[in-house]
Image (cartoon, grey):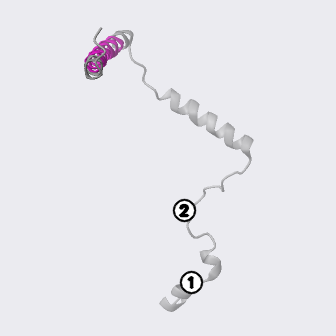
Amino acid sequence: MEEADVADDTSRSDATADKGRPTRKRGEKTVSRNPVKKLGRFLREVVEQLRKVVYPTRRQLITYSIVVLVFVGIVMAYIGGLDLLFGDLVRRAFGADA
């Protein structure tokens, strides 16, 4: 086969019909359009991925929970302090000293 034949073969209009879609791998089946099959496949893959999950130990869970609660407490105190400060500044600015 000559190089010109190869170039001509790829320039056919039917070769560009699937342009923009990835090329299927050898032996790969076409995608099923049946929504029930898609749902079944999705659920199987979810279960498969959930089997790979590594759950924390009880000690790690308690440690992480305490860290989160302490952090939330610090952020609450910071925002509460800003709220009191800005509230006081607004009261002073508009002369509503109480």
> Residue at image x 55%, y 60%?
25
Q: For residue 15: magenta? A: no
Please state which of residues 97 and 71 is positioned toward the viewer in this rendering: 97
- Label 2: few (<14), some or many (≥20) within 10 Å? few
Please state which of residues 11 and 71 is positioned toward the viewer in this rendering: 71
Which disc, if any, is residue 53? none
Q: For residue 67: magenta? A: yes
46 relative to 59 in the view: left or right: right
For mark 2, give the secondary structure.
loop
Instruction: Find residue 48 and report its horizontal and vertical position in percent.
Output: 55, 32
- Label 1: few (<14), some or many (≥20) within 10 Å? few
Q: Which residues are magenta?
A: 64-87
The residue singled out by tag 1 in the image is: 11
For mark 1, give the secondary structure.
loop
Q: Amino acid at mark 2?
A: Pro
> Residue at image x 62%, y 38%?
42
Q: Quadrant of the C terminus?
A: top left
Mark 2–mark 1 distance (CA, rounded to whole Å) = 18 Å
54 relative to 15 in the view: left or right: left
The prevailing secondary structure element of the residues shown in magenta is helix
> Residue at image x 53%, y 88%?
1
Instruction: Find residue 24 and report its horizontal and vertical position in percent.
Output: 58, 61
Instruction: Find residue 87 and report its horizontal and vertical position in percent.
Output: 30, 18
10 relative to 41 in the view: left or right: left
Q: Amino acid at mark 1?
A: Ser
